[in-house]
Image (cartoon, rainbow, N blue to C red):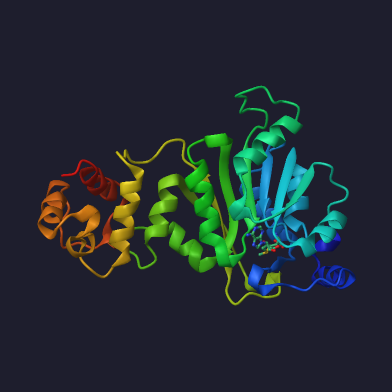
Amino acid sequence: MDKLYSPTTAKMIMNKYGFRISKSLGQNFLTDRNIVDIIIRGAGIEEGDLVIEVGPGMGVLTAAAAEKARRVIGIEIDENLIPILRETLKEYDNVRIIQGDFLKMDLGELIREAKEEAGEAEKGNRESFTGVKIIGNLPYYITSPIIMKVLEEYAYGVLGIQSLTVMIQKEVADRIRAVPGTKAYGALSVAVQYYCVVETVTVVSKEVFIPKPKVDSAVLRLSMREEPPVKLLDPAVFFAVVKAGFGQRRKTLLNSLTGLKGMDKQQIQSLLERAGIDPGRRAETLDLQEFAAIANLVGTGS
Ligand code: SAM
């Protein structure tokens, strides 16, 4: 398996299969054993885990995950990679590769099936795997949709999904982990931090990929919170407030929120005052609690 980590062999495999790299599918293959190990260690994969991988590519992470986990499911959109994966992963009988679009996958169904295959299909038994972990060197053109799909559909213990450990563009990682009052802080930071505790596993130079991307990457571990960090009357209203606030991030809250749920300036002014927030502030200065305070007042129609 070590051979796969060498750029020369990766190129040989591509030649053998007449495989052409697709830029539009965000294909940047990882060719560094150290980084693979760091990602797998960062994901905290345990022996009894089910791992779901987004975009296995030629199988470097998949193989390393298969050595640690009980079961690995890889979802790869590019049908030209399937025969390659069949070869590179042939020694692992705990890997299933599915050809398809991760964004269209019903992860719930996949996880339930995996539990059944594991022979432990008793109804309601979420413990048949010690945990479910998602990993991936994500295709950069759909980084946020992939992360948000998992968080919106499977947060707070649904189906036992515990974490996503993902390699993404460093700039997106900076936005995800940003704190209030910084330039990088925005709707993505609030959304991910609402669902997860964010940790940086490592920063990765662009030199370790074929082809070399334009920018460096970072690996983040997003661990699902067991419960929401703030109490919300209606999460949809919370996200509407966040979206409106950052939609016009240079404006004051008074201006950026006016129009939300049909509320006029005066109503927003009084609502912000009731929430104890200066209407002259901007969304980028608010923390989760402050967004929640506003949302919960909007939610009551005040
Ligand atoms: N995991 C491999 C590695 O680290 O070398 C490949 C990573 S590459 C950055 C991203 C992979 O995601 C590619 O194999 C690409 O074909 C696949 N991909 C792109 N869009 C996808 C989608 N919507 N669903 C599933 N896989 C996708």
Does the rendering let one see residue 163?
yes
Q: Which residue is at the front of the view, 159 or 281?
A: 159
Number of on-image labels: 0
Q: Which residue is at the front of the view, 92 or 98?
A: 98
Q: Which residue is at the front of the view, 111 or 163?
A: 111
Find residue 104 and report its horizontal and vertical position in percent.
Answer: 60, 52
Q: Quadrant of residue 132?
A: top right
Find residue 93 and report its horizontal and vertical position in percent.
Answer: 84, 42
Please state if 141 lies on the left or on the right of 288 as rendered: right
Please state if 153 lies on the left or on the right of 75 as rendered: left
Find residue 218 and report its horizontal and vertical position in percent.
Answer: 57, 63
Please state if 38 lies on the left or on the right of 2 as rendered: left
Determine the residue positioned at 55% across, 61% down: 143
Identify whether 116 is placed above or below 99: above
Find residue 109 and report its horizontal and vertical position in percent.
Answer: 64, 39
Q: Quadrant of ligand 1?
A: bottom right
Determine the residue positioned at 74% across, 52% down: 62
Determine the residue positioned at 32% across, 48% down: 238
Does the rendering let one see residue 200?
no
Determine the residue positioned at 70% across, 70% down: 209
